[in-house]
Amino acid sequence: MSSATTDVLGSMSDKAKETSSKQYQASGMPTLAFWFWFLTGIKTPIIFLFFQDNPQQGTLFSGLISAVLVVMLGFAWYARRVHVKSQSPIAGKIIFVFLTWAGLTLFWTQADSTFTALAYWLLMASEVLAVYMLLRMGPVDETGGKSLQGIALSAVVVAFVALFLGGLSGYGRLGNEEFFHPNVIGNQMAIATLCSIYLAFSNRRKQVGASLWIVVTGLLMITLFATLSKTSIIALGLALPVFIFQSRIRIGRRLALMLLIIVVVASSYTSTATYLNYYVNVEQSGLSLDTLSGRTVIWEQTWATIKERPLLGYGFMSYRDVGPQIIRLRLVEAHNEWLNVWFNLGAVGVVLAAALYSAYLITVLRSTWNVPNRQQAGLGLALILYALVRGLTEGNMTSLVYPLPLMLLMLAWMSQASNKIGGAGTE
């Protein structure tokens, strides 16, 4: 095929993609992606504000939100009829295998209520299914951008609720230990911060839009430091330089981001220093299980329990009911991702989680080879680094530290970038 013919075909393909993108935007489908992530992100403050007297109703309401969103997406999926052929990297397939295995362990779960555990599994699976449908309904770039906006702006709502209505928990930490935990807020702020920085410094963002997302980033970071969530702060501190370096952000923008970080750290210095001084004193005295040395006690007892059922584990979401309970507050996870997965899903679950993270990293590396899409690869790499670091001292009651719906989104986005397909192809 001649060079001229190739250029003509390439130009026709680009025009077709542009037309498809405009049609997708006009259909309102990207708005569904935004609202899915936005409504999913504000569940915790809704429960905190309206369901403290009856947390079970709050959980039911949270599940109802997800169910309604999935049904709406199902109708939109059916109405669209023409679906994008999204890339399906091996890591995406492992997500569904991991979900299937987690569901199978419900047959021997030691959770007090199998029905409740099933409901949580269905909620987790439905959110992954929702993202899968969103990715198939339009160009991944459009879906990805709107999704990040939903994640970031839902975190803004959480930040305002925490700052003005959340109060302070023990040791001056922002949040409520029982219904609106500082570590939960901190985790959401850290993930949303990375998404907001991407939106602010993406080469495709207009200057006005960039300024808005810089302000959002500052608010999210201030809220993160107010939670005094040590693991989230440290993990974000390690992920941010990786994102900045990998994304090849311009020098001027790097300086602006560094200035923003310095201002946030300086404004949070007093409360952070006070808490860290307290933490060091308690750590040295060994009086609290909330410290790192205290968590080693949790890990030791968790491992001793794991050895009784090492292969298949105790079943989905069993830790909160049969795991070691050695502190005042109820432990719902093992404060270490790998021990938590092993306890609930057994060695099989650990192998699947390791395979998933490994396949994800391979997708990231492939995406970095495509220079124009380095920012997507930078975000993908920063997110998994954040999750792996946070997973050293924190876990997730039902899943992995890296949220599976967000992982599926990033996998499709990075895979599309590395293959330069731009959402082409329909069926």
Image (cartoon, rainbow, N blue to C red):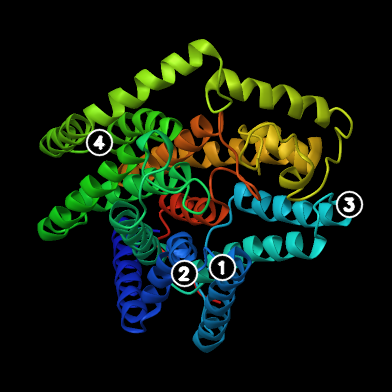
Q: Which residue is mark 1?
A: 58
Q: Which residue is mark 3?
A: 108
> Which amino acid, by three-letter code, is at mark 2?
Phe
* Spot occupied by residue 411 in the image (x, y as percentages of width and height): 51, 51
**CB of mark 1 within 8 Å of CB of mark 3?**
no
**CB of mark 2 within 8 Å of CB of mark 1?**
yes
Which mark identifies residue 155?
none
Disc 3, SS: helix
Whole-angstrom CA distance, mark 2 to mark 1, is 8 Å
Whole-angstrom CA distance, mark 3 to mark 2, is 34 Å
Disc 2, SS: helix
Residue beneath the point at 56% across and 28% down: 392
* Spot occupied by residue 327 in the image (x, y as percentages of width and height): 64, 33
Q: Quadrant of the N terminus?
A: bottom left
Q: Is residue 118 above or below residue 368?
A: below
- Find the residue positioned furthest to the bottom: 79
| Crowd tier of the residue under label 3, counting other residues whose Cα lies within 10 Å: few below 14, some 14–19, many 20 or above | some
Q: Nearer the viewer, mark 2 or mark 4?
A: 2
Whole-angstrom CA distance, mark 2 to mark 4, is 44 Å
Q: Which residue is mark 4?
A: 248
Residue beneath the point at 40% across and 47% down: 175
Q: Give the mark nearest the N terminus, 1 or 4.
A: 1
Disc 1, SS: helix
Q: Give the mark nearest the N terminus, 2 or 4.
A: 2
* Spot occupied by residue 228 in the image (x, y as percentages of width and height): 37, 35
Q: Is residue 158 above or below residue 227?
A: below
* Spot occupied by residue 263 in the image (x, y as percentages of width and height): 15, 34
Q: Quadrant of the C terminus?
A: bottom right
> Which amino acid, by three-letter code, is at mark 1?
Gly
> Which amino acid, by three-letter code, is at mark 4?
Arg
